[in-house]
Image: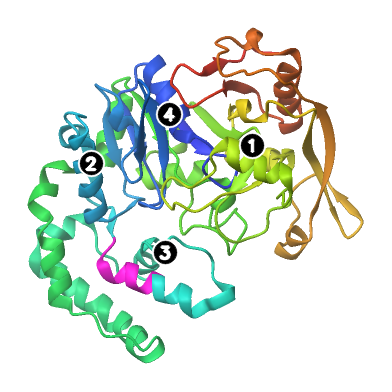
Amino acid sequence: MSAIIVLGAQWGDEGKGKATDLLATTDTIDFVVRTSGGHNAGHTIVVNGEKYATHLLPSGILTPGATSVIGNGVVVSPEALFGEIDGLLARGVDGVEERLVVSANAHVIASYHSTIDKVTERFLGHNKIGTTGRGIGPAYADKVNRLGIRVADLFDEKILSAKVEGALDVRNHLLTKVYNRRAVEADAVVEELLSYAERLRPMVADTSLLLNRALDDGRTVLFEGAQATMLDVDHGTYPFVTSSNPVAGGVCVGAGVGPSRVDRVIGVIKAYTTRVGSGPFPTELFDADGEKLWKVGGEVGVSTGRDRRCGWYDAVIARYAGRVNGLTELFLTKLDVLSSWEKVPVCVAYDVDGVRHDEMPMTQTEFHHAKPVYEHLDGWWEDISGCREFEDLPVNAQRYVRTLEEMSGTRIWGVGVGPGREQTLVVPPA
């Protein structure tokens, strides 16, 4: 038995798909599981020089022989799901639907969720959160308010109609009386959702039972994180967060698998830091270095298409991610982007109104006012994208990795030096 969690240790976009893909191609991975979020996530994988982007689908869908699972903690847009499946089929990826299983208990994103998401953001004006407008938050809100629609409901028209009407009793008052929008017709929503039922039916199962039996049988299950630690609704930079729990504990909830079954928890982290959307970001750069990181790193969101804000590596956040997730290892990505800096700053602590904080400040106010305290490490000029062993890296690049390992408090297991499958180095224990 082997249950492995791969999750983001910053604000997302760290390259989780690359780490997941590496595990799936170097080990025998039987199941790859998404446990939270929706089609607001994005993973980029390069296979044989071809770039693929997955959003709602687990990135393991590109690994022959592996079964991909969308767990109960995910919110599923059927339109987005089938659009993504059809896109992969059109590119010659075979057997996508046959290798995909969807939890009967996963909640469904209906069209009115996206409508509410977009009008709410516009209504908030300069106080907006920076959501993707894809209905993720409203779908989770309906779930918590017990007004949600589950995948299994699409197979019972009577139940589906009752649930949609109940949800719209609340939502339509908001749309018409607060946002001055037209009410949504329940019949139209029901008709649209029912149109997906027959294609979806063969994929639906009790995924908690499926995964626990797989582990009982000694199979290997890889739980693939969406979003990241600093976007967790409880442990992230609230309120500038997602609507679910993408930390390690949330994986167990979103899959129906107990924590005692988990063997490894791998945090994926960039060699610098980025985030998309609003919210505090202590190491954010507004100068030529930030522009260079953005350009060289190709920092545009896979799902959102929005430019990512860029800054230096933040060891405080790395230590925090290690603590709240119980990380066993880190996977460091995009080390190649840092080539050509004479000195590379690393944030080792924060200054908050003259007080040094070596760990995450307790309050939102303190974090908002945090100023980075930097140490400057020696850089390197060599192109490292062709390195295939850790020892092939320039000495200063090796020292950078080892220093981050020490500052972050978690062993670095692998390093990415480019987007390709082959551009990954295994780091020997120090």
Q: Which residue corresponds to mark 1?
A: 322
Q: Which residue corresponds to mark 4?
A: 20
Q: Identify which residue is drawn at 62% across, 18% down.
A: 384
Q: Give coordinates of residue 21: x percent, y percent.
A: 40, 26
Compared to 71, does 414 lie above or below?
above
Residue type at mark 3 is: Gly
The secondary element bearing badge 1 is classed as helix
Tell me: 32 left or right of 408: left
Q: Earlier in the sequence, mark 4 or mark 1?
A: 4
Question: Distance between the Cα atoms at labels 2 and 1?
Answer: 36 Å
Q: Earlier in the sequence, mark 2 or mark 4?
A: 4
Nearer to us: label 3 or label 2: 2
Q: Quadrant of the N terminus?
A: top left
Give residue 85's quadrant in the image: top left
The secondary element bearing badge 3 is classed as helix
Q: Give coordinates of residue 89: x percent, y percent.
A: 18, 35
Q: Which residue corresponds to mark 2?
A: 87
* Residue 403 colored in magenta in the image: no
Q: Give coordinates of residue 113: x percent, y percent.
A: 32, 68
Question: Distance between the Cα atoms at labels 3 and 2?
Answer: 25 Å
Q: Are marks 3 and 1 in contact (CB under 8 Å)?
A: no
Magenta residues (range): 109-117
Residue type at mark 1 is: Gly
Q: Identify which residue is drawn at 59% across, 75% down.
A: 126
Q: Are marks 2 and 1 in contact (CB under 8 Å)?
A: no
Residue type at mark 4 is: Thr
Compared to 266, does 135 lie above or below?
below
Q: Which residue corresponds to mark 3?
A: 137
